[in-house]
Image (cartoon, rainbow, N blue to C red):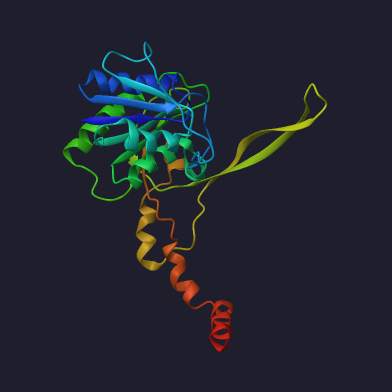
Amino acid sequence: MKILISNDDGIFAIGLRTLANRLAAAGHAVTVVCPDRERSATGHGLTMHKPLRVDPVAAVFAEGVAAWACSGTPSDCVKLALDAILPTAPDLVLSGINHGANLGTDVLYSGTVSAAMEGVLEGIPSVALSLVGPGAEDFQPAAEFAHQLVLGLGQQPLSLPILLNVNVPSRKVVDRIRGVKIARQGMRRWYDQFEKRTDPRGKTYYWLAGKVVEEGEAELPAEPELVAQKQFPTDVAAIKEGFITLTPLQYNLTAYSGLTRLSSWIPYSAVEKSLAKD
């Protein structure tokens, strides 16, 4: 398969190198286009007011891996690769392996997930991959799972416009991986703390830090036909139990369970009638 790989940790990240080299060793045609530096938590940002620069990178990856470092965001990298660098569209877009979790509401900020979503927007099956655990360094199990997943997608391609968000527990989180679970998106609430500092010129600046203070579920009340989804655990819960989590995500953010509720919302109806009189 022709595979495009990006990330948000930068071109020299160990997780990226482990993934690209494993898939190249399996015989896939691997192209890497990544930010030239750390670009975590950039979401789906794009560079619009300055040019993008891209440089070939050698002696970092295994033989056969074509790699470029881009001055832009993760989403920039995928867009640039698809529209300007690659001669033909890849069969698959992979993003990662991220250094850290992308669970629950993390996906709203994640450059890793956004890079994969850019592939979905272009109609290409895409996967975001993350290794969960503080200071996790052994990316080989996650790369091996990615290899098996790529084989599976080659045999049964995704037929829906979704990306697969994969989180793999590291050995620093669990003693052993218990298996794989299809999971729904959970919730992670962070306590944000801005540390106030002063630079050498006497000017004030702030440094954002934070920690997870709550994990669980954060959903609108489900309509009766959606209750069956509760059979699937949240990604947050399943990863704690030692499972690799595989969560389908989509770019359509419509809260379908809210449509019927809004249609009978009295304030909205009153405004509609008032506008009709004008």
Does residue 163 show up?
yes
Question: Does residue 82 sit above or below 231 in this rendering?
Answer: above
Please tell me which residue lies in front, 203 or 162: 203
Please tell me which residue lies in front, 57 or 150: 57
Please tell me which residue lies in front, 265 or 220: 265
- In this rendering, would 206 be left or right of 177? right
Given the current orientation, which residue lies at the most extreme bottom position?
Answer: 277
**Which residue is painted at 54% across and 81% down in the image?**
272
x and y, in percent, of residue 125 in the image = 28, 41
**Which residue is painted at 40% across and 48% down in the image?**
184
x and y, in percent, of residue 130 in the image = 42, 31
- In this rendering, would 211 be left or right of 11? right
- In this rendering, would 216 be left or right of 31? right
Location of residue 190 (image quadrant): top right
- In this rendering, would 255 be left or right of 124? right
Question: Does residue 152 sit above or below 274 in this rendering?
Answer: above
Location of residue 97 (image quadrant): top left
**Which residue is painted at 34% across and 34% down in the image?**
84
Given the current orientation, which residue lies at the most extreme top position?
Answer: 59
Please tell me which residue lies in front, 89 or 235: 89
Question: Does residue 163 sit above or below 87 in this rendering?
Answer: below
Quadrant containing the C terminus is bottom right
Given the current orientation, which residue lies at the most extreme left position?
Answer: 155
x and y, in percent, of residue 213 in the image = 62, 40
**Which residue is painted at 31% across and 14% down in the image?**
62
Quadrant containing the N terminus is top left
